[in-house]
Amino acid sequence: MIHLINSGSATLDATGQQEQDGEPVMKPYWEITAQEAQACLDAVSWYPASTGYFRGGGYSSGFLTRGGMPMTMSRLNLVKGLGPVLQIAEGWTVDIPGDVHKVLNDRTDPTWPTHWFVPRLSEDDPAFKDVYSVMANWGANHASLCFGHVGADLISLASILRIPVCMHNVKESQLLRPSAWTAFGTQDPQGADFRACVNFGPIYGKL
């Protein structure tokens, strides 16, 4: 599992106190009930912010995300000579024993929001053969985490913008890229993605 923490703030929806069909979810704001909003607030402790990170002081929202929520972790790396490349890891939040959480959480910063995350693994992909491999191939120890498995949507958007995807664990059957990508090779879809993006040139940053 990966210990994902946010330095001082995170959406309180990520507490996992909203439910749908008995499962923890993050709902669109117009579907959140007053009871669920209160439950999210009740699951948060407001700690004094660490002045080592936040010189102005204030408060930090500390909470533990409930397990069982589908999540997508992503990161956009800027590589000199190449440009932006996208990384994606779909997975789930998980629950761990309280005493284990306390020991691990106290070794970092217990005043920050914590999410225990397990990515979907695959023996056929060296970057996803185990959780350690995921982090070993990740661009840095930061990422964006959102509710739901939206990796396929991010990959489609990236192809439209001509941003290659260097790492993902989305099933091939869910991928949708422009048909022109097949002209750059069908045996190596990830390599074809890089070649197509270089050939067609970036669309991001243009008016």
Image (tube, helix red, strand yellow):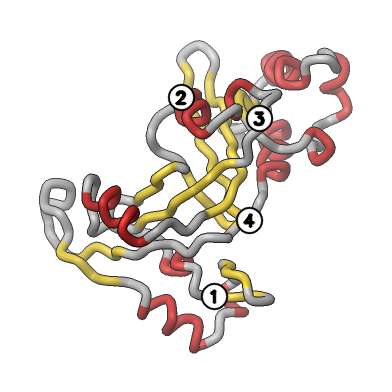
According to the picture, the residue beneath numbered tag 1 turns out to be 18
Image position, residue 148 (x, y; %)? 63, 55
- Could you tell me how far apart the alpha carbons at marks 1 and 2 are, in whole angstroms? 33 Å
Tag 4 residue: 148
Q: Tell me the SS state at disc 3.
A: loop
Q: Residue 43 appears at what percent x and percent y?
A: 37, 74
* Amino acid type shown at disc 1: Gln
Whichever of labels 4 and 3 marks the residue nearer the N terminus, that label is 4
The answer to whether the residues at label 3 and label 1 have Cβ atoms under 8 Å apart is no
Looking at the rendered structure, the kind of residue marked 3 is Ile
Nearest to viewer (mark 3 / mark 1): 1
Residues 135 and 102: in front is 102
- Give the mark toward the camera: 4 or 3: 4
Q: Secondary structure at mark 2?
A: helix
Q: Which label lies toward us, 2 or 3?
A: 2
Callout 2 crowding tier (Cα within 10 Å): few <14, some 14–19, many ≥20 = few
Measure the C-alpha gap from mark 4 to mark 3. 27 Å
For marks 1 and 4 on the same chain, the one whose residue lies earlier in the sequence: 1
Mark 1 lies on a secondary structure that is strand
Other residues around mark 4 within 10 Å, as few (<14) / some (14–19) / many (≥20): some
Question: Mark number for residue 136?
Answer: 2
